Amino acid sequence: METDIDQRSGWPDELCVVLKDYPRETWLKTQSSMAHFWIGKHEYLRRQSEALQSANEKHRAEHTDAVQFVNWTTPRLQGFLSELHGHHQIEDFHYFPAFRSAEPRLTAGFDVLASDHELVHEGIAVVVESVNAFIATLDPEASGNEDAQRHAADRYIEASQLLHRRLERHLVDEEDLIIPLMIRQDSGAG
């Protein structure tokens, strides 16, 4: 089983046992309020991440200056990272342990997801450090120039893009394990 988030392209068959009973195309028709909540939370995280990536692309294309970019990005990035951190805390300390107990055949998948959280949070630290370094280049007291500012912006954008890619892979894989379990549990099966 491929566990590297940068190489993974989904789960092996042995971790799709519940997904086979509750495939993705049935999820929006389910009566499971918890599944709908989880899907909604993940869609919110995706929209926020995509909005940040769009702002990155606009800045790289020089459609925004550095101050506009920072003023738009900073509060949204803070909110997004805070929401992501809180979501992962709930998963790590409540949902993942409960789901491991409910479906021991998926334990290896939950181990991978927990490992993903560590990697995503390392990525968050890099994003925060790099955006702060970029912001520091905007200080009129700082000794720097446009090249230093562009380099700092590029470093932040690259860290942000990597976090976005990893998060998307993680969200898809997490959904494929968790949403079917929620639907099964709420339907009274298993």
Image (cartoon, rainbow, N blue to C red):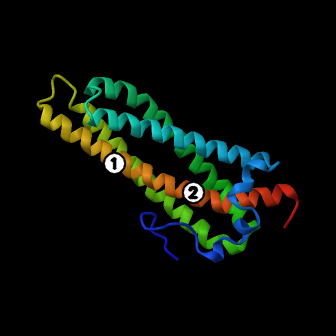
Question: Which residue lies under the disc numbered 2?
Answer: 172
Residue lying at 65% horizontally and 60% vertically, measured from the top left: 96
**What residue type is disc 1 on?**
Ala
Q: In x, y percent, where is residue 66?
A: 26, 28
Residue 141 x, y percent position in the rendering: 15, 24
In the picture shown, does residue 15 fall above or below 132?
below
Give above or below for 107 relative to 78: below
Mark 1–mark 2 distance (CA, rounded to whole Å): 20 Å
Secondary structure under the numbered disc 1 in the rendered image: helix
Count every numbered label the image shows and give the total. Answer: 2
**Picture coordinates of residue 27 (x, y %)?**
73, 53
- Residue 64 is left or right of residue 190, and the answer is left
Q: Tag on residue 159?
A: 1
- How crowded is the residue under tag 2: few (<14 C-alpha within 10 Å), some, or many (20+)? few
Q: Is residue 103 left or right of residue 188?
A: left
Q: Amino acid at mark 2?
A: Val
